[in-house]
Image (tube, rainbow, N blue to C red):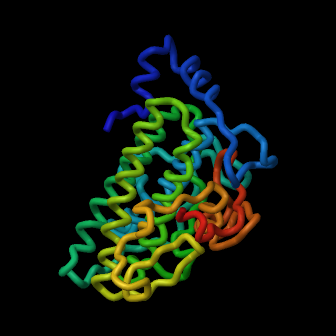
């Protein structure tokens, strides 16, 4: 994967500032999660900063679970533009701990380590691409659901939710991206998140971990899910669900609608897309 998400566009630009202006000209209106008005223009930079907020969360979750420490211990920057109570130097991460992976049959620790490496790479990729426009890491509460690090079952329970958030965040954003270079790399990021989600789903099924649907678009694996459907794909059309930014933030904020903070982000996100909507429904699977 290229170090800079926009290599093909930036190479044709005399300087980064002009390139960023060109990228921002390709704007869209976010379906949910808009800062103040349903018609306020949201740029690709704003969409990518939403993705960066979520990648910070996933990277911290897996890095703490495997290594017992923050992504900063890998030399990854967390400073940038900040909103509200989140510091520009980078927010605090609480609630994380090293997980004891006691069932080696399904390679949970090895897969968690690999996913953690991927998520850290995603943070670096987006930060490099956004440059001075990148948002700082917001304050993150990894144990927002009350579980996640006590044991392998808790870890996989939360990992399943986070991975499905990640997949549907990218599917929801796909239609709002305009620049070819952005679309191509976003597709590659989506593919990576989908592989992560598929792996976590099969581990949940293998260990017979009970799951609860977080909204109407959540297809959960056995033993709690329907029949032998292991993956979060609509069997009627072969497609993954899509969620708007607001529906993604509903989950990230601990299943709270019309909120600007809560759950994994106790002081909210950094950037322009900061408000949750109501939950996704079965129609998001169509």
Q: Residue at x 23, y 84 (%)?
A: 103
**Is 99 drawn above or below residue 111 in the view shown?**
below
Which of the image's four quarters has the C terminus? bottom right
Q: Is residue 258 left or right of residue 234?
A: right
Q: Residue furthest top?
A: 14
Q: Residue at x 36, y 34 (%)?
A: 3
**Is 10 drawn above or below residue 263 in the view shown?**
above
Residue 70 lies in quadrant: bottom left
Residue 151 visible, this angle: no
Q: Residue at x 58, y 55 (%)?
A: 91
Which of the image's four quarters has the N terminus? top left
Q: Is residue 267 left or right of residue 183?
A: right
Q: Is residue 78 left or right of residue 74?
A: right
Residue 206 lies in quadrant: bottom left
Residue 102 location (% of width, % of height): 25, 84
Q: Is residue 127 left or right of residue 215?
A: left
**Is 132 drawn above or below residue 156 in the view shown?**
above
Q: Residue furthest left?
A: 105
Residue 43 visible, this angle: yes
Q: Residue at x 40, y 62 (%)?
A: 238
Residue 150 location (% of width, % of height): 41, 84
Residue 145 location (% of width, % of height): 56, 78
Residue 46 location (% of width, % of height): 62, 41
**In front here: 3 or 29?**
29
**Is 18 drawn above or below residue 231 in the view shown?**
above
């Amino acid at each position: 994967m290229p170090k800079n998400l926009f290599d093909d566009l930036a190479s044709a630009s005399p300087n980064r500032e002009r390139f960023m202006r060109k990228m921002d000209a390709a704007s869209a209106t976010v379906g949910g999660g808009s800062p103040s008005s349903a018609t306020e223009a949201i740029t690709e930079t704003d969409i990518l900063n939403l993705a960066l907020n979520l990648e910070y969360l996933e990277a911290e979750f897996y890095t703490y679970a495997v290594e017992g420490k923050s992504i900063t211990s890998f030399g990854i920057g967390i400073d940038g533009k900040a909103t509200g109570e989140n510091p520009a130097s980078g927010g605090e991460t609480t609630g994380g701990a090293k997980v004891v992976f006691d069932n080696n049959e399904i390679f949970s620790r090895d897969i968690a380590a690999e996913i953690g490496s991927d998520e850290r790479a995603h943070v670096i990729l987006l930060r490099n691409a956004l440059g001075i426009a990148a948002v700082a890491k917001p304050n993150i509460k990894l144990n927002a659901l009350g579980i996640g690090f006590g044991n392998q079952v808790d870890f996989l329970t939360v990992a399943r939710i986070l991975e499905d958030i990640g997949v549907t965040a990218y599917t929801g954003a796909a239609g709002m991206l305009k620049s070819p270079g952005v679309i191509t790399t976003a597709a590659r990021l989506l593919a990576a998140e989908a592989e992560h989600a598929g792996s976590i789903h099969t581990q949940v099924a293998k260990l017979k971990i009970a799951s609860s649907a977080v909204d109407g678009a959540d297809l959960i694996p056995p033993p709690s899910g329907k029949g032998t459907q292991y993956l979060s794909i609509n069997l009627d059309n072969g497609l993954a669900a899509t969620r708007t930014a607001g529906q993604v933030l509903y989950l990230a904020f601990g299943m709270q609608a019309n909120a600007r903070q809560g759950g994994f982000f106790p002081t909210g996100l950094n950037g322009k897309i900061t408000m949750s909507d109501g939950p996704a429904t079965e129609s998001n699977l169509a």
